[in-house]
């Protein structure tokens, strides 16, 4: 008989994603053993994740690992893991800005950061991207406040706002805003912008790939030829960006752009990368909004560009709008990205223990 061991966790919705949040020290320190535990906890590999707590979707098969930080000026370290639904794979190369929305509340819940008044600032170091983020969390009486009147597209109802202020976001993996030194490149006859803000991305115009840019996620996912061509292009982009062979990896991510149809400044679809995001990733929103404001990029002729150095960029996506507060310096091709901020929400779903086979713990 295989014995089981209990691992404490809190299941949370962060932004438009969902997953378990762990204190890092509650998981094995050995990476391979840790990944086996995460796969077992989520129920992967299995299309239904029937033997775990995963939600059978890439947006609900995510994990946050949080620990008190020893870094100066930082409260907690956050490591994100994307757990594959159908493969025995755990990827810690990318980050997730939606799951990040729950890190501040989780740190307060677990006593890593004391609540201070009506708002508590939690200073987070993202291990995946070596970047700092400040999360402003609503608190009251020493506890996290989850109820509120803030709505975000892709999530029903309303909740308390979590403000995420991203610092050090340029060159998250490549060290450069434009890894090839130019805002335009051509891959397979298609103009692309290879850009790295919060996450490295390959961005192209929808029309250049035979799309309108307004398709639903289901319509895009059904076009296997489109995805095959996009994946071949993404692998070339990865090599040119200095990321090496990105086969089987999830970065660089991909987005396609179109002119806005409503109140937004740009319409976009985000790929994760082998499936269309049902809404939009936060890190992807930071990168796409930066591209939208960058003259000479594939956004020329499509994006509306608000004036000034501190601007709110609205991205139209399948579930609505993503608001990105973007701070920049300079104009034209010499523009520099200073920081980006977004408003997300989070909700604690349950706190308890998830059980995994004891032999996986080593």
Image: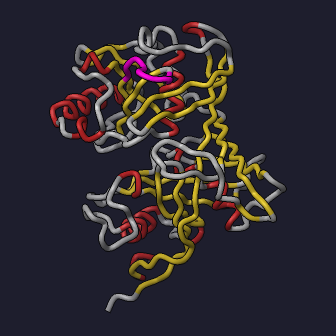
* Residue at the (36%, 33%) spot, across then down: 244
Q: Is residue 330 above or below residue 31?
A: above
Which image quadrant is residue 217 in? top left
Main SS, magenta residues: loop
Extreme right residue here?
117
Q: Is residue 260 magenta?
A: yes
Q: Is residue 230 left or right of residue 298?
A: left
Question: Which one is nearer the viewer's eye here, 283 or 194?
Answer: 283
Residue placed furthest toward the left: 225
Looking at the rendered structure, the number of numbered marks drawn on it comes to 0
Q: Please tell me whether residue 33 is drawn above or below residue 276 in the rendered image.
A: below
Q: Position of residue 83 (x, y in %)?
A: 38, 57
Find residue 185 and report its image quarter. top left
Q: Which residues are magenta?
A: 257-264
Asked whether residue 172 appears in the rendered view, the answer is no
Question: Which residue appears at 74% of the width and 64% of the height?
Answer: 143
Residue 321 visible in the displayed image = yes
User: Residue 111 magenta-drawn?
Assistant: no
At which x and y percent is residue 77? 64, 53
**Left/right of residue 225 with respect to residue 50 in the rendered view:** left
Quadrant of the rendered image containing residue 270: top left
Quarter of the image where the C terminus is located: bottom left
């Amino acid at each position: 008989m295989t014995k089981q061991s209990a691992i404490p966790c809190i299941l949370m919705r962060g932004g438009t994603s969902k997953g378990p949040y762990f204190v890092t020290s509650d998981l094995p320190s050995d990476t391979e053993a840790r990944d086996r535990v995460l796969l077992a906890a989520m129920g992967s590999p299995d299309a239904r994740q029937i033997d775990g707590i995963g939600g059978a979707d890439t947006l609900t098969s995510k994990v946050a690992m949080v620990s008190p930080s020893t870094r100066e000026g930082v409260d907690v370290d956050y490591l994100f893991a994307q757990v594959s639904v159908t493969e025995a794979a755990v990827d810690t190369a990318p980050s997730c800005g939606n799951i990040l929305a729950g890190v501040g509340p989780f740190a307060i819940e677990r006593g890593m950061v004391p609540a201070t008044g009506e708002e508590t600032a939690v200073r987070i170091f993202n291990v995946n991207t070596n970047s700092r983020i400040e999360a402003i969390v609503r608190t009251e009486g020493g506890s996290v406040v989850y109820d509120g009147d803030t709505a975000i597209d892709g999530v029903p109802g309303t909740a308390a706002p979590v403000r995420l202020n991203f610092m050090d976001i340029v060159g998250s993996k490549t060290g450069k805003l434009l890894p090839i030194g130019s805002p335009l490149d051509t891959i397979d006859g298609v103009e692309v912008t290879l850009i790295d803000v919060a996450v490295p991305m390959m961005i192209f115009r929808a029309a250049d790939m035979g799309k309108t840019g307004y398709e639903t996620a289901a319509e895009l996912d059904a076009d296997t030829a489109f995805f095959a061509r996009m994946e071949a292009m993404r692998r070339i982009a990865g090599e040119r960006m200095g990321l090496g062979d990105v086969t089987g990896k999830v970065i660089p991510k991909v987005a396609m752009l179109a002119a806005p149809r409503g109140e937004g400044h740009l319409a976009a679809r985000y790929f994760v990368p082998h499936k269309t995001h049902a809404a939009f990733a936060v890190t992807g929103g930071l990168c796409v909004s930066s591209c939208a404001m960058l003259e000479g990029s594939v956004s020329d002729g499509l994006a509306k560009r608000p004036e000034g150095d501190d601007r709110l960029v609205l991205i139209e996506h399948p579930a609505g709008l993503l608001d990105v507060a973007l701070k920049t310096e300079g104009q034209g091709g010499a523009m520099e990205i200073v920081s980006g901020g977004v408003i997300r929400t989070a909700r604690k779903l349950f706190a308890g223990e998830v059980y995994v086979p004891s032999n996986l713990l080593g």
